């Protein structure tokens, strides 16, 4: 019977055919009227082995602005949970925060 066939997918879980996207980083973010675009990047190795790895932007994720805000809040809560669980340290989070702050400060300075 058709009802006896396994579907291959467990209820309440994503289907097995759902693609997985691996990214090493969000390389850049741009904002437009009502949307936010995040550019995903990964570090790819030279398949010939002749050069070091290279960062390649390979996809963009486009969200309505309010959805981006919700995503940012969700991600921040995940970082807090990761610190609490010992998956990362607060020092690592603070180090990344300081690095981004320094990058923002450097890019805000006028060219000399």
Image (cartoon, rainbow, N blue to C red):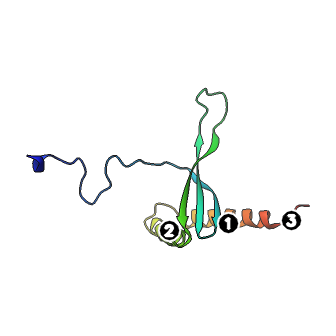
* Left or right: 48 as drawn, with respect to 110: left
SS under mark 1: helix
Front residue (pair 9, 2): 2
x 50%, y 61%: residue? 88
Tell me which label, 3 or 2, sits earlier in the chain: 2
What residue do we see at 86% from left, 65% from top? Answer: 110
Q: Are marks 2 and 1 in contact (CB under 8 Å)?
A: no
- Name the mark nearer the viewer: 3 or 1: 3
* Helix, strand or loop under label 3: loop
| Upstream in sequence: badge 3 or badge 1 | 1
> Which element carries disc 2, helix, strand or loop?
helix
Q: Sequence-wise, which precedes: disc 2 or disc 1?
A: 2
Q: Assess whether mark 1 and mark 3 are in contact (beta carbons under 8 angstroms).
A: no
Q: Quadrant of residue 62?
A: bottom right
Q: CA distance from mark 2 to mark 1?
A: 22 Å
Q: Residue 13: which quarter of the image?
A: bottom left
Give the numbered dot on residue 71.
2
**Viewer-proximal residue among 98 and 111:** 111
According to the image, label 3 marks what residue? 110
Q: Give the left or right position of residue 17, taking residue 44 as reference.
A: left
* Image location (x, y in percent) of residue 64: 53, 68
Tell me how far mark 3 sits from mark 2, CA to CA: 32 Å
22 sits left or right of 26 in the view: left
Tag 1: Cα neighbours inside 10 Å, few (<14), some, or many (≥20)?
few
Q: Residues within 10 Å of mark 3 (few under 14, many from 20)?
A: few
Circle 2 residues within 10 Å: few <14, some 14–19, many ≥20: few
- State the residue at coordinates (67%, 66%): 98
Q: Which mark is residue 98?
A: 1
- Residue at 17 percent of width and 47 percent of height: 6
Determine the residue located farthest toward the right in the rendered image: 112
């Amino acid at each position: 019977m058709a009802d006896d066939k396994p579907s291959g997918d467990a209820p309440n879980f994503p289907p097995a055919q759902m693609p997985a996207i691996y990214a090493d980083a969000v390389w850049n973010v741009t904002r437009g009227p009502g949307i936010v675009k995040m550019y995903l990047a990964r570090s790819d190795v030279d398949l010939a082995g002749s050069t070091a790895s290279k960062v390649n932007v390979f996809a963009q994720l486009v969200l309505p602005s309010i959805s981006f805000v919700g995503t940012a809040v969700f991600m921040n809560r995940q970082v807090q949970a990761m610190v609490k669980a010992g998956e990362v340290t607060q020092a690592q989070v603070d180090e990344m925060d300081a690095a981004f702050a320094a990058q923002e400060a450097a890019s805000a300075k006028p060219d000399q």
